[in-house]
Image (cartoon, rainbow, N blue to C red):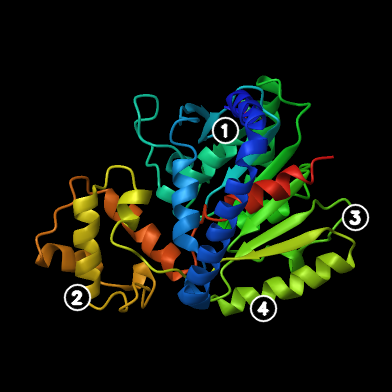
Amino acid sequence: MFKRGNRMLKQRNNAQSIRMPVITAFCIVICVLVWVLYRESGEKSDSFSGVIKENLNSFSSSVKLDPTVEFRNGTDLIWQIPDSPKAVLFLAHGCNGKAANFWDRSPKCLNCVGLPEERLIVLSALARRFAVLAVSSAGRCWSMEDERLIVKDIIEWWVVKQKLQSLPLVALGASSGGYFVSVLATDLRFSSITIMIAEGLFDRMDIPKSYPPTLFVHMPKDKTRRLKIERYLTLLKGEGIDVAEVKCVEFALSPNLLADRIPGLDLATSVKLYSLFQEKGFIDTKGFMRNDGRAIQWKPALKERDVVLLDKSIADHIQEEMNLAFAYHEMTSLQSEKIFNWFETHMS
Ligand SMILES: *[C@@H]1O[C@H](CO)[C@@H](O)[C@H](O)[C@H]1NC(C)=O
């Protein structure tokens, strides 16, 4: 992919002198357009539809999900290693999650679920040449005691088995997985970590000087967590730890959004769902969710209208996108670029 990019760049260089004024004019037009659109879209929506499109289309041809499933220490681990990996990413799901949520169902992983945000995180990781390892928690959520040792053991064993010991190790945990990663970072040497929609357990542990650089990816609408994260940002900074935060805000659904983000959901169904949500008042006139997907009685509404989902499991995928759009508490891949930039700039 990168090689081809370089070649194209070279060809372009030859014609550059002629095209320069045209390109400049084009850029100005685009900038003005972006500025106008951005101004009109207001604060809420940002330019998320653009971000969404981009982060979907950029992988479609270059990376493919191709997991390997293993069973060890009473749990399953699922992993994928790209060509010439540059780092190892450990992924920790939230409560009710599992490793199988990160990869699409395929002959190599019949139990895989491929939730939309989870799979996009893995695709982003692979596109940036991170080897990805996901482990399932033994219970519904992660246990902060024994499970730490088991997972530490699994990660160390796996890294050696795959001969990836020389690579930097990073971690991303969401919700329960975020708390888990925040403490696992005292057991294992991560070059940096991302704690998503969680504040971590920093008031319950001694923070060593060697604690890894920590990025908080959170949804400020969840005010309780936001306040705790603000407190921990200050606390960690005071300890000399490199920290940063990325805030995720709500965005409007569009008729095609569900089809764009959920493999196996066709455009016709997506459009039908959107108008149903509008009729039922689940979204406002601009398409913003009025509540979290978990709190809305949207499944009975489907039945009522005879909207049939070919695959029942797709309901969970739809709900994840509704939660994401509401931006209170959900796994998000929309910030992948910032997350992987964080990992890549903290690898020494
Ligand atoms: C995990 O399994 C391996 C191999 O069966 C075993 O040697 C190791 O002690 C186990 N680790 C823990 C923490 O139970």
Label 3 sits on what residue type?
A: Lys
**What residue do we see at 21% from left, 76% from top?**
280
**What residue do we see at 55% from left, 39% from top?**
134
- In this rendering, the answer to whether 113 lies above or below 226 is above
How packed mark 3 is, by other alpha carbons closer than 10 Å (few <14, some 14-19, many 20 or more), is few
Q: Nearer the viewer, mark 1 or mark 3?
A: 3
Q: Which residue is mark 2?
A: 279
Q: Would residue 256 be visible to someone looking at this image?
A: yes
Residue 10 pos. (x, y %): 66, 27
- The answer to whether marks 2 and 3 mark residues whose Cβ atoms lie closer than 8 Å is no
- The answer to whether marks 4 and 1 mark residues whose Cβ atoms lie closer than 8 Å is no
Q: Nearer the viewer, mark 3 or mark 4?
A: 4
**What residue do we see at 30% from left, 72% from top?**
296
Q: Nearer the viewer, residue 159 or 5?
A: 5
Secondary structure of the residue carrying tag 3 is: loop
Residue 74 pos. (x, y %): 52, 35
Q: What mark, if any, has residue 209 been given in the picture?
A: 3
Which label's residue is closer to the chain start, 2 or 3? 3
Which label's residue is closer to the chain start, 1 or 3? 1
Which label's residue is closer to the chain start, 3 or 4? 3
- In this rendering, the answer to whether 242 lies above or below 227 is above
Label 1 sits on what residue type?
A: Asn
How packed mark 2 is, by other alpha carbons closer than 10 Å (few <14, some 14-19, many 20 or more), is few
Q: Would residue 172 be visible to someone looking at this image?
A: no
Q: Which residue is mark 1?
A: 73
Q: On the rendered image, what quadrant is the N terminus found in?
A: top right
Spatial separation of the CA atoms under disc 3 and disc 4:
24 Å
Secondary structure of the residue carrying tag 2 is: helix
Quarter containing ligand 1?
top right
